Amino acid sequence: MYMFLYSLMGFAFLLAIFGIDLADLVIILGVIIPPYFQEKLIKRLGLDKMEVVLDDIKLARKKMIKRSLWQALLVALIFLVTAIYLWTSGMAQDGFYTFDFYFFKTIPLLMLIFFVLAFFTYYLINRRKIRIVED
């Protein structure tokens, strides 16, 4: 993964030498693509599934709830960063939103809705990944 990121940064440096400024795009691709391939490999190897005996089912459910919570928090963080970007780029001001209305009413309400939806979605998906193994 590091070689991929280093080669992308070298490619961005070469583009900058020739006067083409695509370094931001190349670095973003270098940050987004490796986790995608890691997740694809994890699913192909079956490492995202949890095999437990019947006695440990409660512990497995707690672990999956914690995993769902972290995944939903990541969705909320991505939403918050996107909202901040929309404000700084001026797109939110084009809709005649004030700072107070945008950051103190709209964003918290939408973050709560997205967090709850993401949590329940990830919870249902993660709950299916628990396999009960017979002794």
Image (cartoon, rainbow, N blue to C red):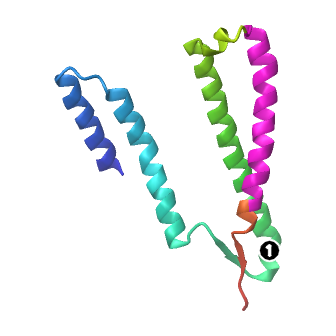
Q: Where does the magenta region start and end?
A: 97-124
Q: Examine the image and state in which quarter residue 96 appears.
A: top right
Instruction: Write the residue at 71% across / 77% down.
Output: 131
The quadrant of the image that shows the C terminus is bottom right
Instruction: Write the residue at 78% across / 10% down.
Output: 100
- Left or right, residue 19 beside residue 78: left
Mark 1, other Cα within 10 Å: few <14 / some 14–19 / many ≥20: some
**Of 73 and 16, the residue lying toward us:** 16
- Residue at mark 1: 57
Q: Examine the image and state in which quarter residue 105 appears.
A: top right
Position in image of residue 66 (x %, y %): 74, 54
Position in image of residue 67 (x %, y %): 70, 55
Q: Examine the image and state in which quarter residue 27 appears.
A: top left
Question: Which amino acid, by three-letter code, is at mark 1?
Answer: Ile
Provide the secondary structure element on which disc 1 rests. Answer: helix
Position in image of residue 68 (x %, y %): 72, 53
